Amino acid sequence: MTELADLHTTDETGASVPPLLRMARETPTRLWNDSATPAELSAAIGWGAVGATCNPVIALAALRSDLPRWRQRIRAYAEEHPTASESDIGWAMVQELSVEAAALLADAFAEHRGRNGRLSVQTDPRLYRDADALVAQSVAFDALAPNVIVKIPATETGIRAMEEATYRGVSINATVSFTVPQAVAVAEAIERGLQRREAEGHDVSAMGPVCTIMVGRLDDWLKAVAKRDVVTVDPGVLEWAGVAVFKRAYQVFGERGFRTRLLSAAFRNHMHWSQLVGGDVVISPPFEWQVRLNASGIEPLSRIDEPVAADVLETLYTRFPEFRRAYDTDGMTPAEFQDFGATRKTLRQFLAADAELEALVRDVLLPDPEK
């Protein structure tokens, strides 16, 4: 049972201290904000956030949240670049949004000497089959601001790109990642890139690589599998899948001494935060989840090393072959990553968001005459 905090926990001024801020102050676990919207990021910084993550869906939401301003900017950019495609314009807006958000994290970046204070910019999902293109875009995004971290999908192609981009000095945030074998492959690739860089005399101490595990999306996939395959288990069992995978990956990372940190994202329940506190990891909830967690009264105690209940783990492991693929370090080869169900679903969603970004630009430049 998760303990509830004394809801009157206060600081020296008598003000109540939110659980997320307590976590940031009292544990090695770091809070990042899963949004690049300036107002949300600013609020999260007040709760101790020292970084931010973004993806095509989140970037699109950020543009829509302040659409009058971005409509004006889209028109101006189109006039300045008369041959730019709708896609070019949309991605230019994402880059401008990212630079604005990165500036809000500059102080944290300096304080944490590059390990935190970073703003994630995700590579174009349409490049997922082209390692060279992913590397080139990563290097370009890295130049947008000193504290950018670049997201690349944890597919076989993406992992090749991660090693090369790391070697070129780009801090990587692996995304479209749900499993232990993906996380291990990511960390090994980044380690190779760091070692190549060190061998040439470059200092890598200010680089801050992380590997996201989209814990909630793994839960979502296993629930879809349970429905598809007509598998019935006790209520709540499937809420633990992402937590179990994250804890297992954290154990493996510690054993192997990887310099990449794990990051928990894609929240579906409070355990995607509360069960992972205490580790040298990053927790990146969507802003609305931060509001919920701060109001929850759940104590930010160290639980990262607490094992998932044996009966829950056994049920997941014996009833769901897809969980075994996700949990075992050798559950999948890199060649199989792209065909994992959660990977396919997430890549398709990111590709759809990219299409919506183009449509947003089209609606500004060529509005429907019948509306």
Image: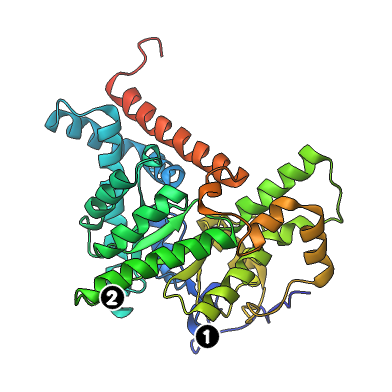
Which residue type does callout 1 highlight?
Answer: Glu
Residue picked out by circle 1: 26
Q: Residue at x 34, y 69 (%)?
A: 117
Task: Establish if 253 lies above or below 65.
Answer: below
Task: Establish if 51 lies above or below 322.
Answer: below
Residue situated in front as seen by the camera: 102 or 291: 102
Relative image position of residue 331 (x, y in whole percent): 63, 58
Residue picked out by circle 2: 206
Residue situated in front as seen by the camera: 180 or 217: 180
Relative image position of residue 114 (x, y in whole percent): 30, 73
Q: Residue at x 19, y 77 (%)?
A: 201
CA gap, disc 1 to disc 2?
Answer: 23 Å
Instruction: Tell me if residue 291 can be seen.
Output: no
Residue situated in front as seen by the camera: 28 or 326: 326
**How has the structure been colored for display?**
rainbow
Q: Residue at x 40, y 35 (%)?
A: 354
Instruction: Tell me if residue 266 can be seen.
Output: yes
Relative image position of residue 69 (x, y in whole percent): 29, 39
Res. 252 image quadrant = bottom right
Give the quarter of the figure containing the C terminus.
top left
Left or right of 277 in this view: 358: left
Which residue type does callout 2 highlight?
Answer: Ala
Secondary structure found at label 1 = helix
Which label belongs to residue 357?
none
Give the quarter of the figure containing the N terminus.
bottom right
Left or right of 79 in this view: 44: right
- Viewer-nearest of discs 1 and 2: 2
Give the crowd class for mark 2: few <14, some 14-19, many >=20 residues within 10 Å. Answer: some
